[in-house]
Image (cartoon, rainbow, N blue to C red):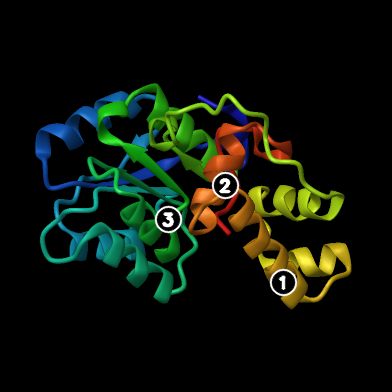
Amino acid sequence: MDRNAIDSLGGALPRVLLGDDHTIVAEGVAQLLRPDYRVLPLVADGLRLVEAALRDAPDLVITDISMPSLSGIEAIRRLRDAGTAVPILILSMHTEPAMIEEAFRAGAQGYVVKSMAGDDLLRAMRNVLRGGTYVSPSLWPRSVRSEPAPKLTVRQREVLDLLVSGLRSREIATKLGLSVRTVETHRQTLMSIFDVRNGIELVREATRLHIGAAAEPFVRNWP
């Protein structure tokens, strides 16, 4: 267990709320987490997940996507709409890029594939509890280019590093002394250079090529 995560909670074990309608899977995850985490009573549908998260104020929520009543993504939206900032991890069998992007847009901080729910999940939990963001490495592009990484201007590299580090366009603009519009232009140019369609793919590609701040296997926030 990461001592920093425990210290940030005053020495108490982090309290984790699990949402999954597959009891065997949920029980297996709960067993994995003990004794380093305090696992709250399991919930099996999205509506109860929202109710439990608001009532019990856990330190971390782990939820599946496909659940009765509400999907995990819709549950995240409701929690964010309610004003809770609790870190949330998705633990799902879904690996579609659109699903992953939707989860992060809804307010998730991490996405772990169920088939990797072991050390990968524990690593994701540690990162999220420290304020980071995590995506299972198996979701990154598997191919490795033989050609060198694209050459970027100094400004493009600065913008890319800050995007991967988790800053939004407005924050990047303030940090670099640029207008938001200029930052957005750089971002669109970077997407064109890397031949990707959105911010998630841009981060993945930069990570795969180990460019600047993207050398780490997780980022603090999705742009």
Q: Going 34% across and 56% down the picture, which residue do you hit?
A: 98
Q: Which residue is tagged 3?
A: 108
Residue 125 as seen in the image, left or right of residue 206: left
Q: Going 55% across and 28% down the picture, which residue do you hit?
A: 145
Residue 114 as seen in the image, left or right of residue 175: left
Dot 3 falls on a residue whose secondary structure is: loop
Dot 2 falls on a residue whose secondary structure is: helix
Q: Give the image quarter of residue 215.
A: top right
The residue closer to the viewer here, 103 or 118, is 103
Q: Which mark is residue 218?
A: none
Gap in Å between the C-alphas at discs 2 and 1?
Answer: 18 Å
Q: Position of residue 62 (x, y in %)?
A: 33, 46
Chain-order first, disc 2 or disc 1: 1
Amino acid at dot 3: Ala
- Of the two numbered discs 2 and 1 in the rendering, the one whose residue sits closer to the viewer: 2
Chain-order first, disc 3 or disc 1: 3
Q: Which mark is residue 170?
A: 1
- Residue furthest out toward the right: 177
- Of the two numbered discs 2 and 3 in the rendering, the one whose residue sits closer to the viewer: 2
Dot 1 falls on a residue whose secondary structure is: helix
Amino acid at dot 1: Arg
Whether the residues at callouts 2 and 3 have beta carbons within 8 Å, the answer is no
Residue 65 visible, this angle: yes
Gap in Å between the C-alphas at discs 2 and 3?
Answer: 16 Å
- Of the two numbered discs 3 and 1 in the rendering, the one whose residue sits closer to the viewer: 1
Q: Position of residue 26 (x, y in %)?
A: 19, 37
Residue 13 visible, this angle: no
Q: Give the image quarter of residue 212.
A: top right
Q: Which residue is tagged 2?
A: 203
